[in-house]
Image (tube, rainbow, N blue to C red):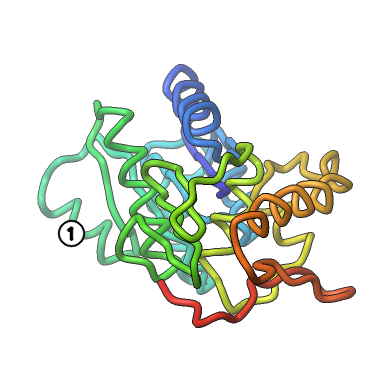
Amino acid sequence: MRVLIVEDEVRLAENLVQALRESNGFAVDLAQDGLDGEHLSQNECYDVIILDLMLPGQSGLSLLKRLRARRNSTPVLILTAREGPESIIQLLNEGADDYLSKPFDLGELIARVKALIRRGKGGATPVLRVSDVTLNTLEQTVHRNGQPLDLSPTEYRLLEYMMHRPRAIVSKRELLEHLYDFNWQHHSNVIEAHISNLRRKLDASGAVAFIETLRHRGYRLAEQGAER
């Protein structure tokens, strides 16, 4: 999944990027002022935006309003030093999905980010099920027919993204945009290899091919009574 962080506190921003990338496998883009944040947010490939309120160039609240005015529905988690009920009510009324008051625990932030992504994809629980494949987004485990699968981090991320949209055709470009940061062009020739390895591991534990390739269109999970 791909996250945009808009935060001008350098140490905090670095800690957020490191925690999301290294521990949870997210692709992360960082903007350190409101104007850069708005520019990056116009690329609507993000699965969640983490937005500080006090930013140079443009405030977080102004950026949030402009996001929603463009009908950008990406989930937004606000980081704020404001704790008054009036300010929180305003944030939620302007379109924020959640908030954390500074200082906060990194583990709590990551849990909230994951919950926002699940809700944004229409899933209420951390367990995704499609046919005979089960994926637990908290434990980052995958089973097919009850058998555990040993996936690489990239293979896991590919599968998680596709299982969030089990009936959709997912293009290679979409996968690149959601799984890598803004330098994704450097990875443009690796998706096919990762899909091939993922398909091999999945199909070794199942009777039916799980990932379909649609020529010139992308990939889709096989329709076998898919469910969440």
Give the camera-side residue of 92 and 220.
Answer: 220
Residue 57 higher or lower than 61, as above or below: above
Residue 190 image point, x, y percent? 83, 45
- Closer to us: 8 or 139: 139
Q: Residue at x 58, y 51 (%)?
A: 38
In the rendered view of the protein, which quadrant contains the C terminus?
bottom left
For badge 1, the amino acid type reads Ile
Question: Residue 173 at what x, y percent from top left?
Answer: 78, 60
Pinpoint residue 143: horizontal percent, then vertical percent: 48, 53
How many numbered discs? 1
Q: Is residue 17 left or right of residue 228?
A: right
Residue 148 falls left or right of residue 187 = left
User: Position of 33 compared to 121: left or right?
Assistant: right
Residue at 53% in and 26% down: 22
Residue found 36% across the figure and 49% down from its top? 77
SS of the residue under disc 1: helix
Residue denoted by label 1: 89
Q: In the displayed structure, does residue 213 sit left or right of residue 99?
A: right
Identify the residue at the far left of this view.
85
x and y percentages locating residue 107 in the rendered image: 31, 31
Crowding at dot 1, Cα within 10 Å, few <14 / some 14-19 / many 20+, comes out as: few
Q: Is residue 29 above or below residue 10?
A: below
Q: Is residue 192 above or below residue 213?
A: above
Furthest-top residue in view?
A: 11
